[in-house]
Image (cartoon, rainbow, N blue to C red):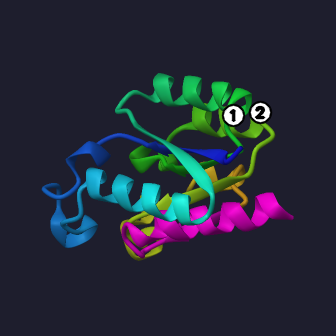
Amino acid sequence: MAATILILNGPNLNLLGTREPDIYGRETLETIEAACRNRAADLDMDVDFRQSNDEGQLVTWIQEAPKSHAGIVINAGAYTHTSVALLDALSAIDLPIIEVHLSNIHRREEFRHHSFVSKAADGMICGLGGQGYELALEALAKRLKN
């Protein structure tokens, strides 16, 4: 049975492709999802791809993840920099977690340099656009085999 990876996307990521394309690119969330599904299939994994603008929904999905998922890829969007609730939920579960950001958060506004998610994540990929999600899947595949 293939491992299922939960891919979580936070607020405003549903607007990819039209929202600030000079920062986030023209790739849509649907395009990123399709690429993740293809890469996961190559890695003999499945993905459960979700997006919510609601912090509480993301917390609930994280809390439920250990029941049916082998790992998490998370782009928490703006909640990366503000949400202790996401940090607490991620810290409470025993799954490998890879944090992803489309832009390089360290080249942006100072407030974006801090990530609560990083405190619970095994690693972070930022600045590589949608490719970062695929690299996160590769990292999880390797971790799950070891």
Nearest the eye: 130 or 111: 130
Marks 1,2: beta carbons within 8 A: yes
Rendering quarter of residue 23: bottom left
Q: Residues under labels 1 and 2: Cα distance?
A: 6 Å
Compared across the picture, whether 5 is left or right of 96 comes to left
**Residue found at x 48% / y 63%:** 133
* Circle 1 residue: 88
Quadrant location of the C terminus in the rendered image: bottom right
Residue 129 within the segment the image draws in magenta: yes
Image x and y of residue 32, in percent: 35, 58
Point out the residue furthest to the front here: 1
Q: Secondary structure at mark 1?
A: helix
Image x and y of residue 64, in percent: 65, 25
Q: Main secondary structure of the magenta part?
A: helix
Point out the residue furthest to the left here: 18
**Residue found at x 39% / y 27%:** 54
Compared across the picture, whether 92 is left or right of 124 comes to right
Residue 64 within the segment the image draws in magenta: no
Q: Secondary structure at mark 2?
A: helix
Q: Which label sits on residue 92?
A: 2
**Mark nearer the viewer, 1 or 2:** 2
> Type of residue at label 1?
Asp
Viewer can see residue 13: yes
Q: Which residues are magenta?
A: 123-146
